[in-house]
């Protein structure tokens, strides 16, 4: 009888210890999971934008344009806002999803792949196509010519998936190099100066860069038209709707057109 009683005591103690440990682990999990952060929470705090790094240089027009557009949207919102800059899209998405930022204010291709991790605003800019950037004497005339070639892109999962699908369609490999710390403009410059042989990027940025760099060829389009937009967390639908309203107001005011004209878009 004593042995049974003693055994029960040990069992009870073991269960108690297990329960305490489970509660501690659960508390840690809850602590590590980011809390809901949508419009109401942001309105009582700070609207945090993250956009691309930029230099004070005409060649960095895309980053500058979206930085200034974020300023216009911040003013239109009437909220306290802050803008930080990070080149890496992947890093920006990671920090967005742990609530360090609320809006990725840069043109992102709204592809099926990118929609897995982001909720997109209405399109910020006109439909865009992907093009191959090569030097003037480049040999890429159509998709099949990319077989076995090495192409450089920014760290956009959507662009990467499009190229991977293209490689599958042509039945050959295309070697993709993601430049995590470069902007689209910087990659194009490195093609022009022969650091890279080929790059793939949006036609809008490529057209603008050709105004400044004469020895690049951007005539080979490799995708259908794709929308570009800003991204927010998937659990921030009210913020997304608010951004759509603010963006539309900025467009209707004429400020958006003035800004795009300023940077040659």
Image (spheres, rainbow, N blue to C red):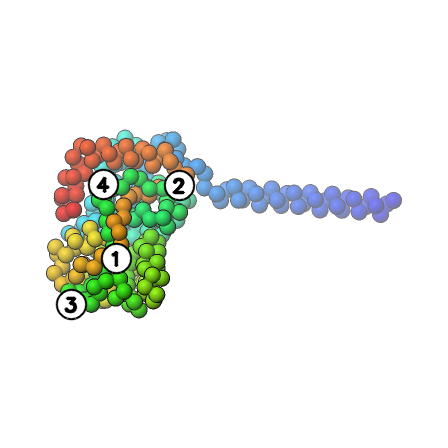
Q: Residue at x 34, y 61 (%)?
A: 169
Tag 1 or tag 4, which sits nearer the N-term?
Answer: 4
Q: Can you say whether 14 is above or below 188 in the image?
A: above
Residue 131: % across, % down: 23, 57
- Identify the element where label 2 is drawn: loop
- The residue to which callout 2 is attached is 234
Identified at 37% across, 46% down, the residue is: 115
- Marks 4 and 3, Cα distance to the nearest angstrom? 36 Å
How many residues crowd mark 4 within 10 Å: few (<14), some (14–19), many (20+)?
Answer: many
Tag in front: 1 or 3: 1
Label 3 element class: loop
Asked if marks 1 and 2 touch (Cβ < 8 Å), the reply is no
Dot 2, how many residues are within 10 Å of its Cα: few (below 14), some (14-19), or many (20+)?
some
Task: Assess whether mark 2 and mark 4 are in contact (beta carbons under 8 angstroms).
Answer: no
**Which label is found at residue 222?**
1
Mark 3 → mark 2, Cα distance in angstroms: 44 Å
Name the secondary structure under disc 1.
loop
Q: CA distance from mark 4 to mark 2?
A: 22 Å
Question: What's the residue at 25%, 42% (across, down)?
Answer: 124
Disc 4 from disc 1: Cα separation: 29 Å
Mark 1 or 2, which is nearer the eye? 1
Q: Which residue is mark 4?
A: 69
For disc 3, the marked residue is: 137
CB under 8 Å between discs 4 and 1: no
- Quick one: label 3 or label 2, which is nearer the N terminus? 3
């Amino acid at each position: 009888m004593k042995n049974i009683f003693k055994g029960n005591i040990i069992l009870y103690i073991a269960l108690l210890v297990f329960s305490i440990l489970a509660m501690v682990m659960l508390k840690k999990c809850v602590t590590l999971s980011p809390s809901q952060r949508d419009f109401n929470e942001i309105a009582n705090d700070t609207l945090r934008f993250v956009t691309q790094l930029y230099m004070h240089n005409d060649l960095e027009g895309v980053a500058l344009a979206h930085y200034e557009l974020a300023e216009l949207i911040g003013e239109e919102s009437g909220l306290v806002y802050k803008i930080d800059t990070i080149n890496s899209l992947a890093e920006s998405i990671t920090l967005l999803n742990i609530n360090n930022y609320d809006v990725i204010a840069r043109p992102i291709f709204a592809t099926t792949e990118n929609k897995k991790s982001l909720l997109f605003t209405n399109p910020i800019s006109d439909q865009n196509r992907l093009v191959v950037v090569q030097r003037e004497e480049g040999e890429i005339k159509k998709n099949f010519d990319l077989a076995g070639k090495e192409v450089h892109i920014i760290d956009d999962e959507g662009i990467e998936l499009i190229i991977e699908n293209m490689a599958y369609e042509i039945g050959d490999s295309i070697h993709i190099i993601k430049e995590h710390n470069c902007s689209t403009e910087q990659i194009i410059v490195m093609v022009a100066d022969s650091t890279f042989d080929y790059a793939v990027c949006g036609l809008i940025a490529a057209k603008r860069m050709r105004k400044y760099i004469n020895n690049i060829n951007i005539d080979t389009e490799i995708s259908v038209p794709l929308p570009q937009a800003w991204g927010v967390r998937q659990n921030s639908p009210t913020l997304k709707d608010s951004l759509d309203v603010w963006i539309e107001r900025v467009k209707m005011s004429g400020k958006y057109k003035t800004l795009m004209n300023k940077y040659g878009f």
